[in-house]
Amino acid sequence: MNFTISMEQKILRESVRNFAEKEIRPMARQLDETESFSYEITKAMGELGLFGIFVSEQYGGQELDYLSYAIAVEELARVDASQAATVAAANSLGVGPIYYFGNEEQKTKYLPKLCTGEMLWSFGLTEPDAGSDAGACRTHAVLDGDSWVINGSKIFITNASTDISGGITVMATTAKRDDGRPELSCFLVESGTPGYTAQTMHNKMMWRASNTSILYFEDCRIPKKSLLGERGKGFHQMLATLDGGRLSIGAMGLGGAQGCYDLARKYAKERNQFGRPISTFQANAFKLADMAMEIECARLLLYKACCLKDQSQPFTKQAAMAKLYCSEVMGRAANHAVQLHGGYGLMKEYDVERFYRDQKLLEIGEGTSEILRIVIARLIGAY
């Protein structure tokens, strides 16, 4: 077993870390406070090559492996979850479905701009009444001649309503199967299509500098060729997309936990009480030790899951485990970090307050912790 990353991956980590420290950290607090999506940072992340990381060079991608992608997201999340979310959603949920399931015409049309960050794409799965229960999808599409007509709505969709949002991959019911279950298919809907509206959601607790949207489809007519892959394969496409997405959410949890640890350790070594640094008190030292241990375990689990994907081996179970564990490790790390900061940890001028808020979505998005435990239990044969 090889526990070391390649020289190329080390260079990537250092490059993204330096970028995040110099370009993102100085702006993160203000962007969070004003709830502003940064086009400048997004453009700079595109120039750094953080979009289309795993896409082949044929379509303008970097043609790196999934582990490299996870490392990049990890380093962004170590500084700011919002910018990490923009990259993670753009790659796993935006680029991924088109790259893996699109035809040549669709790939050639959309991927080059998506790989530069010039354009963002999103994935429409969650609905007001269908979150974890994707089979309860109410958005429906009807074939009418040479067009599909879509009606319905989606909610909590990342990257869908910015000025550079090019469109969305939307899952919709297209029929009922013989067993009574819905036939689900995915479609590519471009921004500006009549009948399609994307509205930015405000007043979020977390990821406040990331774009989150609610979408409406009202007799939205799209060409028949906008179907992604085969009709009726939408549920399979959604599951495959979530498997890859869970690795990026795991990377966000890992990076966020590392960021919490870094801030907590630095503060604990500088803060003096009773004549010595608070890091020297056993109660506090044990918190730091637990954080370091769990982060190390989380990194090994996530990297293993990424390596399985890169080797084209089954990784669904490991992806679910990595997403679940990394997100909850960050929860514990954020809690310890705030505790070590004391009252200052509750103030917005200290970054741990933002990390504490940002963590919660990791236990909800792309499979809640409860759903992931069900997934893992099934995969290990518990029921």
Image (cartoon, helix red, strand yellow):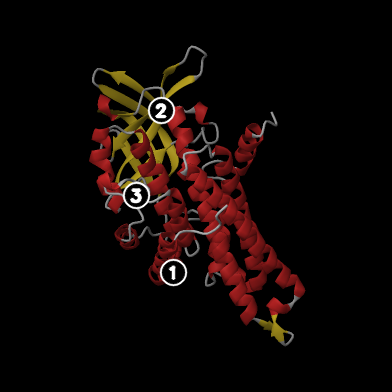
In front here: 97 or 144?
Answer: 97
**Cα distance between the residues tagged 2 and 3:** 31 Å
Instruction: Give the image location of residue 316, x and y in percent.
Output: 54, 38
Look at label 1 and name its amino acid.
Answer: Arg
In front here: 4 or 45?
Answer: 4
Instruction: Give the image location of residue 362, x and y in percent.
Output: 55, 50
User: Image quadrant for the C terminus?
Assistant: top right
Q: Is residue 44 above or below residue 304?
A: below
Q: Mark 1 and mark 3 in contact (Cβ < 8 Å)?
A: no
Residue drawn at (53%, 68%), measured in percent from left and top?
351
Q: Which residue is mark 3?
A: 63
Packing grade of label 3 (10 A; few <14, some 14-19, many >=20) is some
Residue most toward the bottom?
A: 275
Q: Is residue 262 above or below residue 202?
A: below
Is any part of residue 139 visible from this angle?
A: no
**Cα distance between the residues tagged 2 and 1:** 39 Å
Dot placed on the residue nearer the N-terminal end, 2 or 1: 1
**Cα distance between the residues tagged 3 and 1:** 28 Å
Q: Which residue is mark 2?
A: 172
Tell me: 167 left or right of 208: left
Residue drawn at (41%, 34%), measured in percent from left and top?
153
The nearer-to-camera label among 3 and 1 is 3
The nearer-to-camera label among 2 and 3 is 3
Is any part of residue 345 visible from this angle?
A: yes
Residue most toward the right?
A: 282
Look at label 2 and name its amino acid.
Answer: Ala
Q: Mark 3 and mark 2 in contact (Cβ < 8 Å)?
A: no
Element type at mark 2:
strand
Element type at mark 1:
helix
Instruction: Give the image location of residue 356, x and y in percent.
Output: 58, 61
Q: Mark 1 and mark 2 in contact (Cβ < 8 Å)?
A: no
